Amino acid sequence: HPQFESIQRVSASGLLRGHGVPFKWANQTWFYPDSIVNVGVFVQGLKQFEGYELRISENKTPLTSEYLLERLSTSLKIGIPELEKVLDEHLDTAILDWNKVKEKKEISRAELAVLLDVLINPFEKKIDMHGDWKIGMSIDNF
């Protein structure tokens, strides 16, 4: 899958979780990269990253690029134009074309993984001994 590396990083960080499936003696985790993300799943992962208590969100509304940018703008404390500038400068169009994502009404799990990987860059954040992020979200690595 072209977005495999981003999917791995974002899944391992807990920002977007897979689904556990028991299979014989080994459990498997399935990501379903082409499935549409709903707002509840997105917010659940983001709240964990922001340091808020996890609560299951029942919002089944499909995630849109507009909502994604609004929510990340608030979390990262930067404007939407700056977020789009980061995407324009750092997103490899061979992996994901941001302009095509903006035109769509819904975002897939693979697309969200790539966007979160670029904007949050979870593997570059500092963590404590419990695996929790030490500092709030920021976009200071750009």
Image (spheres, rainbow, N blue to C red):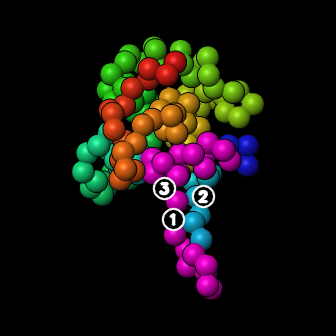
Q: Is residue 81 magenta?
A: no
Question: Based on the displayed image, in which of its 4 quarters is residue 94 positioned?
Answer: top right
Q: Does any portion of residue 105 appear in the rendered image?
A: no
Q: Residue at x 52, y 18 (%)?
A: 142
Q: What span is colored magenta in the figure?
A: 4-27
Q: Which residue is mark 2?
A: 32
Q: Residue at x 43, y 27 (%)?
A: 69
Q: Is residue 100 left or right of residue 16?
A: right
Whether 85 is drawn above or below 17: the answer is above
Q: Nearer the viewer, mark 3 or mark 2?
A: 3
Q: Which residue is mark 3?
A: 17
**Other residues around mark 3 within 10 Å, as few (<14) / some (14–19) / many (≥20):** many
Question: Based on the displayed image, in which of its 4 quarters is residue 136 positioned?
Answer: top left
Q: Which residue is mark 1?
A: 19
How far is the residue under mark 3 from the one under mark 2?
10 Å
Relative to the observer, which residue lies in front, 132 or 19?
132
